[in-house]
Image (spheres, rainbow, N blue to C red):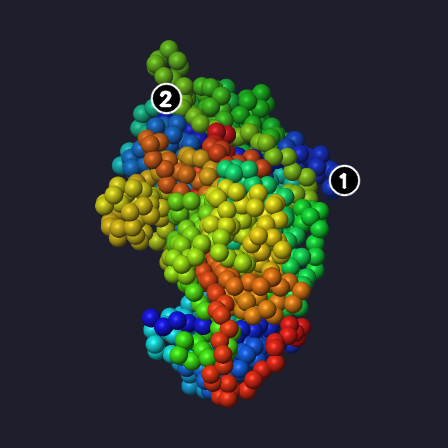
Amino acid sequence: MRDAYLVGAGQSDYGAFPAESYRSLFRTAFDAATDSVPKGLEAGDVDEAFVGTLGVGGRQLGLSGPAVTEHVGLDGVPTTRVENACAASGFAVRQAVQAVKSGMADVVLAGGFEIMSDMSSDATKYWLGVSGETEWERLSGTTFSGVYAQMASVHMEQYGTTREHLSRVAVKNHENGAKNPHAQLGFECSLEDAQSAPVVADPLNLYHCCPTSDGAACALIVSEDVVDEYTDDPIRVAGVGAGSDTVGLFQRDTYTGIPASQRAGEQAYEMAGVDPDDLDFAEVHDCFAIAELLAYEDLGFCETGEAGQLIESGATEIGGELPVNTSGGLKSKGHPIGATGAGQVVEAYKQLSGNAGERQVEAPTRGLTHNVGGSGGAAVVHVFEREERRSSRNSSAHRAREKEQEVSA
Amino acid sequence: MTAITGVGAYAPRFRITSEAFEDAWGQFHAAGISEKAVPSADEDALTMGYEAATRALEAAEADPDDIDWLAFATSRPPAAEDDLTARLGAMLALSESATRHAFTGSTRAGTRALWAGLDALEADATTALVVAADAPQGDPDDGIDHAAGAGSAAFVLERDGPAEIVDRAEYSAPYPGTRFRNTGEDETQGLGITQYDRQAFTETIGGAVAGLEDEPDPDAVAIQAPDGKLPYRAAGAAGVGTEEVRAAATVHDLGDLGAASVPVSLASALADGYESVLAVSHGSGAGADAVVVSVASKTDRSDSDVPAVTALEGDGPLTYAEYLRQRGIVTTGPPSGGGAYVSVPSWRRSIPQRYRLEAGRCSACDALSFPPDGACDDCGALADYEPVELAGEGTIEAVTTISQGGAPPEFAEQQARSGDYAAAIVALETDSGDETVSVPAMGTDADPAAFGVGDRIETTIRRIYTQEGVTRYGFKIRPAGE
């Protein structure tokens, strides 16, 4: 099978934008993605598109893919909407990789969007947790904060994980997000702040929960046959893994791990031929603080039950052994559901191309993204790897691009 | 002859004192009531009826399949039109072909149901279940609401048993305006014409008792109690002493129980071992029923005590503000919304699980799945399931307390009324206790802090939520043992 490469990725700011629409945010992300391609990429180059969105608010629920791709001028390009809850655009990226590897397409757009802030808070609440198991789990009175809190209750009981461990995830991710101009909650928080916030679903407090966000993100995946037309610094999609599970937590064998993440991680490592030790950074799905700790264990960053110690050791901070969520994660950068997975790939692209500004990890060659739908009903993992710089063979086809700068708009 | 062979009674755990009303209003309009029971936000006449009925069945050691006649009585049915006996029967696992009757429209409905049960046994019914449950409600500033309590009682009736019904009579005379609720209204009201109201009360009660074949000589009198004074005022008309009225009185501690007033007092008197009980109801309109229950003396029978399982104690004191919240008087109702819709037909499909904890045994691997639908949780086979009713007891595997703002909007109104709640995953056991299957469930009947990983729980049935005007009922959990 052909190799697939990540040649560009960009995102809109994440936050609450009453003056924007889902289409205008998608356009911002699309422009940022195409602009980030070192040798440039035109809309007309795109063969196919996959767009992730949950459809919060029930706006364009049908044909929401073409609704944005036609808007940005991908005229007539086959577009498929991908829905896997919070992992929608992580799976859109996976679909793009499959399309390239299968040989059916050479240049594929994988993106996602969500608008969550333009409704009354009551109406918003109806849409939170719609990816939980509706008939039983939700009707026991839970949305995702409750379900992840249940996982936390067992992890704390079994492994001695503490509320402070949870709060340390928030402190770290806010410290990183403060360095990301796209972050929705781009401010630092103290451990004391993160310990004393109002409880949402015990043991999770407000600082252990990600915000609701508007935003869009796009990634551009191309085949090995054309990669040289777009960059001399190829970033290969070295590994892809994915898995599914029961939608309801109560139907799983374990509450202290996410089997779909474990499966996705193992597949991705195997395909990439790497171990967790070979990673230089990771963007993991921290919708709730406990979710980041579970990811450490599910993805093999530490042994089962030791995530609390890992966050406490500082190993996952920027400058640590394996920086996690340098972008600020869902917690600080924001979580526009359908955009999140592609947004993680944006961070991987920035880190691997050395454009992550103040939060740049030193000379990384390999990074992982990990995107979870719901409480673990779906999960997808990608490993991206920077290859040796190539001499330019085809530089005349596209305009040369100045080295990308981190921009705040 | 007909007899009571099992008694159940229930009152919600929440209580408010007359002092709390005095603090709020400067006075308390319900004479003779020192404390009363308050239904939780997830309770109504149907769930309270279920609570009493399961206890009566347990006391009578009756198999639900043997019940061939069911009556449900309340002055406050949660739906004004919609026969709730179908749902009550399903919650109790009664046969679909059992005869069902609903009685409402008056505080006399409870004894009317009992009356009809006696008639049915004299005809062709063999085992009847009479359920009365009520939670009156009035305007917050009047006596009806100040007196309004909550509770339920249920009786299993058979042709022979320890507590025989030996005499009965009824009486009616027109007295409009004493207590009424017009179509479309929520609050029960009365014109408050003191002497007229008393006359209606005493004339009907006196008339019913006078109609009995033998002049009764009861040890205890279960008499309609709209407040804590009227039953004593009517003692003379009923030809009984105030001591006997006090012996069966529940109004002082539970408040006005409406259609369940006389049934709960009767249940309480039988549970307390009284051997001759006169039960006299009164309903506005007005009318009264008098029923004499005689427990065979202990020398005549080996097991003369009437089997009874009651849960009338309270443990949740409320302030007046909490009382207004709990009853939904100061909350605004559920928000309008969008996602996570469960249609009524989909809900109905799950009724065997919601009401009776029906799991399924996989025909391929013998493991249990809940709900018994789709591929087996254990072996993944798309095999058939053999229904297995779980026992309603188990252990908490994972739990959280949902704070304000953390609840799905369907539960926002309930949370505004009753506060934070526990949401758990519990391992529910089979009858033998050898196997478990995990289910998600909301906590009720206790503070959320009372639910911890590893704690024992039992299930009950409560209101889950109301959407499109249709209230969905299903199981919830509470700490084991009451």
Observer-nearest residue: B132 or A11? A11
Residue A198 point in image, percent of width and height: 66, 49
Observer-nearest residue: B201 or A401? A401
Is label 2 in contact with label 1 (beta carbons under 8 Å)? no
Give the amino acid type for the residue marked by disc 2 in the picture: Pro
- Which residue lies at the image location 68% right of the left edge and 39% below the top edge? B319
* Residue identified by numbered label 2: B162
Residue A237 point in image, percent of width and height: 44, 67
Q: Residues within 10 Å of mark 2 (few under 14, many from 20)?
A: many
Residue B345 point in image, percent of width and height: 37, 58
Chain letter for mark 1, please: B
Label placed on residue B309: none
Label placed on residue B26: 1
Q: Is residue A207 above or below residue A387?
A: above
Give the amino acid type for the residue marked by disc 1 in the picture: Gly
Q: Is residue A239 above or below residue A165?
A: below
Chain letter for mark 2, please: B
- Which residue lies at the image location 42% right of the left edge and 67% below the top edge? A94
Quarter holding residue B49 = top left
Split into 4 quadrants, where in the image is the N terminus of chain B? top left
Tell me if B132 is positioned left or right of A200 in this view.
Answer: left
- Which residue lies at the image location 47% right of the left edge and 23% below the top edge? B271
Residue at the farthest top position: B299
Residue B48 point in image, percent of width and height: 48, 40
> Element type at marker 1?
loop
Q: Earlier in the sequence, mark 2 or mark 1?
A: 1
> Element type at marker 2?
loop
Tell me if B291 is positioned left or right of A21 in this view.
Answer: left
- Which residue lies at the image location 37% right of the left edge and 24% below the top edge? B164
Q: Is residue B96 above or below residue B36?
A: below
Q: Residues within 10 Å of mark 1 (few under 14, many from 20)?
A: few
